[in-house]
Amino acid sequence: MNTVNSPTPAMTEAPARHEYWMARAVELARRGRGPTAPNPCVGAVLVRDGQEVAHGWHERFGGPHAERRCLAHAREQGVDPSRCTLYVTLEPCNHHGKTPPCTEAVLEAGIPEVVVGALDPNPVAQGGAERLEQAGVRIRTRVLEQQCLDLIRDFRLWQSTDRAYCILKMAATLDGRIAARSGRPEPISSPESFSDVHRLRGLAQAVLVGGSTFLGDDPSLTCRLADMDQPTGSTAPSLYDQQLINDEQPYAVVLTSRLPGADCELQLIRKRPRQTIFWTTEQAAASETARALEDIGVRVWALPQQGPTLQIQEGLRRLRQELNGHYLLCEGGGQLATNMLEQGAADEFVLYLAPRFLGDAQAAPLGAGRHCETMAQAMDLRLGRCEPSGPDLKLTYYPPDTSGAD
């Protein structure tokens, strides 16, 4: 942990205490993921004498920031902030935007000490920690920094690129199989994980599958969480609360070089044509089949190719630029997952690992399509979170990123 100014003896005592309260702020921040886009999700906790006395998080884009919500909560509780320490996952903003600077609110409240998780990467808003220090506030920064940076990984990508943030989701057995050799669509993971996947769909503005899944499973790709009861004892994280589900269903996106006919009986064409997008080759996008699909409301987008492989980044760019889509959830098979990771199109990899073992070499693998002679050719990922999901493990990984998110 680094400090902006020299720490006092009280500040150096029990650093685990600072991490404990920052972890609480991180937990709160996750509740805002989705509605805050394209702003970052931020959490704040006000602590006095080792007790939480107020808290807040950024709930929605254009709404009060976490610090102001925390201070409002303190007023409701009759708490004097001038006797408290403020823990906040992101450096308080220092500029006038849709809301006034949070640095002003902190100074007006007379808070003597602020503990910050991550410094703000936005050049317009950064400088809050320095501003507070100059005003005499004790500042400690970079507490649980990696966790706090992971919270705003999406925000940092939106700041540095013009594309949507992509979450790659997969479920596998302990031996890395995503389907039995029959290929039939059968559940691998638990009901708790199934519900959590629909929370992810509720977060996303689009859900992507490959052509094989589209033809073989005939999916609807809708978010059905509103029709479910939360499983008893569920440990699903609060960031996917039902209140965060989009009012509209996510777009259904299919990556394929072969377009279906407009008169086919598949669900997406028959029931959701205006919410369906095909990412395909330039040749297929110029075909009569594409014209017929567009006539019934389907969108057909041509993606550039590198050899036989469609380049997914262009689809992510158009999703954000044309449809204001900030999140895409990819639910493809092993080949699509491998392509996403190879192309740097997957910004977050969520893996539900079920306590099941097939032991069948012919069962569908978690990844496919690469030829690696040595482990040096492996794609490395960083584990961000590991949490239970019923009997399963929910693992969240982050690939190395060249856009500034790591």
Image (spheres, grey):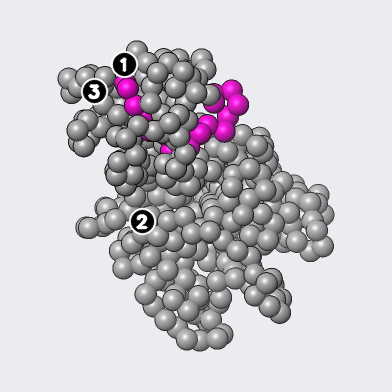
- Which badge, 2 or 3, is on the more N-terminal residue? 3
Real-space Cα distance between discs 1 and 2? 41 Å
- Tell me whether the residue at label 1 lies in contact with that at label 3, contact meaning CB atoms closer than 8 angstroms: no
Disc 3 is placed on an element classified as helix
In the image, 366 versus 65, the foreground residue is 65
User: Which residue is rendered at x = 20% and y = 36% of the image?
Assistant: 51
Mark 3 lies on residue: 83
Please give the range of residues in magenta.
111-126
Q: Amino acid at mark 1?
A: Ala
Mark 2 lies on residue: 195
Q: Amino acid at mark 3?
A: Arg
In the image, 304 versus 146, the foreground residue is 146
User: Which residue is rendered at x = 58% and y = 51% of the image?
Assistant: 347
Choose top left, top right, bottom left or bottom right for residue 82: top left
Q: Is residue 150 magenta?
A: no
Judged left or right of residue 152, residue 82 is left
* Label 3 CA crowd tier, 10 Å (few <14, some 14–19, many 20+): some
Q: Estimate the x, y position of residue 97 in percent, counting from the top left.
A: 52, 17
Judged left or right of residue 233, residue 40 is right
Q: Main secondary structure of the magenta part?
A: loop
Mark 1 lies on residue: 109
- Please identify, in this view, whether the residue under mark 1 or under mark 3 is nearer the observer: 3
Residue projecting furthest to the top: 108
Q: Amino acid at mark 2?
A: Ser
Q: Estimate the x, y position of residue 46 in percent, counting from the top left.
A: 28, 30
User: Which residue is rendered at x = 51% and y = 15% of the image?
Assistant: 96
Q: Is residue 121 magenta?
A: yes
Disc 2 is placed on an element classified as helix
Choose top left, top right, bottom left or bottom right for residue 343: bottom right
